[in-house]
Image (spheres, rainbow, N blue to C red):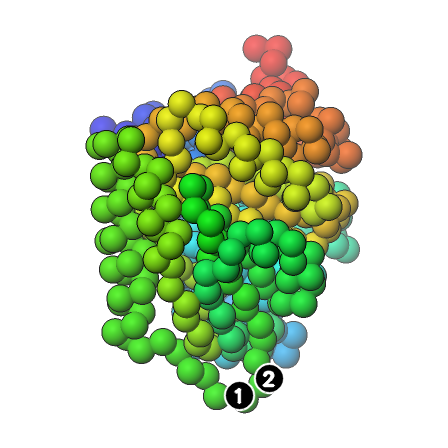
Amino acid sequence: MNRWTNWAGTATAEPHRVHTPRSVAEMAEVVAGAAVDGRRVRPRGSGHSFTPIAVADGDAIDLTHWRGIASVDAENHRVTVRSGTPLHQLNAELEALGLAMTNLGDIDAQTISGAVSTGTHGTGARLGGLATQIAQLELVLADGSVVTCSADRRPDLFAAARVGLGALGVISHVTLQCEPAFALSAQERPEPLEGVLDGFDQFAEENDHFEFYWFPYGRNALVKRNNRLPSGADRKPLSRARQFLDYEIMENVAFGTLCRVSRAVPRLTRPLGRFASAVLSAREYSDLSHRVFVTHRGVRFVESEFAVPRESVHQVLSELRALVPRLENPVAFPVEVRVAAADDLWLSTAHGRDSAYIAIHQFVGMPYREYFAGFAAIVAEVGGRPHWGKMHDLDAAALRALYPRFDDFLRIRDEVDPAGVFANPYLDRVLGPAPRAADR
């Protein structure tokens, strides 16, 4: 049985074959064989996308055995990493080399190829998503050929493939522009939501990394400000006991218990949400960057996230705050708000505009469709772009209107995979079928 389920339980697949390559040559052989036989093939990593983007209805390429840093350019702070490497492994290997990625999200379970292909990002008004840190990509194309692309070599393919949705080929290697390891000071504390909203633009600009979590039905937000320390500054990490208490007990065990109670007795969700907002605690510490960026998430949830023009964040949050009390089913999880700088990647959610990312969540097993649909309608008013790895209902026609280079992306897709070897139902919906695949 080849049954596969993603982390959130929102997507399943039963591929005909599962391949576990240990070399680029093996990847190329799998892809070329599938193309000749008229089969479709999808790469998969950790399954941390909430959408069915990794679902294989033909062959699956499991990258579990394709991990680790392959080479290091120490002088230029660049590393070339195998595409199946989970971010937590990559961060550990970079630390051993005295290097770090410039910015990260708050989850490190994804593979590097899955993270960049879906537009994973962190927060920081002057910083882009993970894909903006890519210097070069190596891909296996639909005919089994292996190509390298960068800003100077096949630049159009590079512009498309950095957030490529797995639609252009199987990424085999990712070359990342890193930097010397650095430390962050972290300040996390509850603050009245109204004050956070009033100061949003100032906070985003004056901190290297700024985000907040709003707990529906409560008055407080949990605000996180992370800022770089000077090179050589002393680090003051949380003690092991404090880490265990704050992150494992409070944010996972205790919060998970509140969520399970809410699922079992929905009428308690609102008072429990007010309680969770009222008991948020403050902490300050400093540590190596990846240890500050990343938080262990043990409580499972479903998620929808949209990037909106940063100047529209107040409008969106105002309408979202009005929506939540009207929902038939209450919300057990907080709303997360982050920021990112504009970039020029064709399918990046921050393409051409400074962005705010607003992510809504619901505990697994609790009703979410009314909430997610209402949120989607709100962000549609300001041109919201859905995160490629998180839940949304938009199709190719709607997405074309949101991305100025959408048709350029399709042109590259049609050049390198005209028969849709790398397609699946999700990609058929968000991109439209490949030209020759549509004729079959």
Residue found at x 51% / y 75%: 185
**Callout 1 amino acid:** Ala
Instruction: Residue 48: name its quadrant.
Output: top left
Alpha carbon of mark 2 to alpha carbon of mark 1: how far?
6 Å
Does residue 227 show up?
A: yes
Residue found at x 51% / y 56%: 192
Q: Relative to residue 135, is residue 144 depicted above or below? A: above
**Callout 2 amino acid:** Pro
Residue found at x 24% / y 53%: 253
Which residue does the numbered mark 1 point to in the structure image? Answer: 233
Which residue does the numbered mark 2 point to in the structure image? Answer: 230
Dot 1: few (<14), some (14–19), or many (≥20) neighbours within 10 Å?
few
Where is residue 336? Give x, y as percent. Answer: 50, 48
Quarter in which the C terminus is drawn: top right
Residue found at x 38% / y 54%: 278
Position of 130 compared to 14: left or right? right
SS under mark 2: loop
Position of 319 compared to 185: left or right? right
Position of 414 compared to 335: left or right? right
Instruction: Residue 247: name its quadrant.
Output: bottom left
Quarter in which the N terminus is drawn: top left
Where is residue 11? Give x, y as percent. Answer: 38, 29
Q: Residue furthest top?
A: 440
Query: Foreground: 40 or 35?
Result: 40
Disc 2 + disc 1, Cβ < 8 Å = yes
Position of 277 compared to 230: left or right? left
Dot 2: few (<14), some (14–19), or many (≥20) neighbours within 10 Å?
few
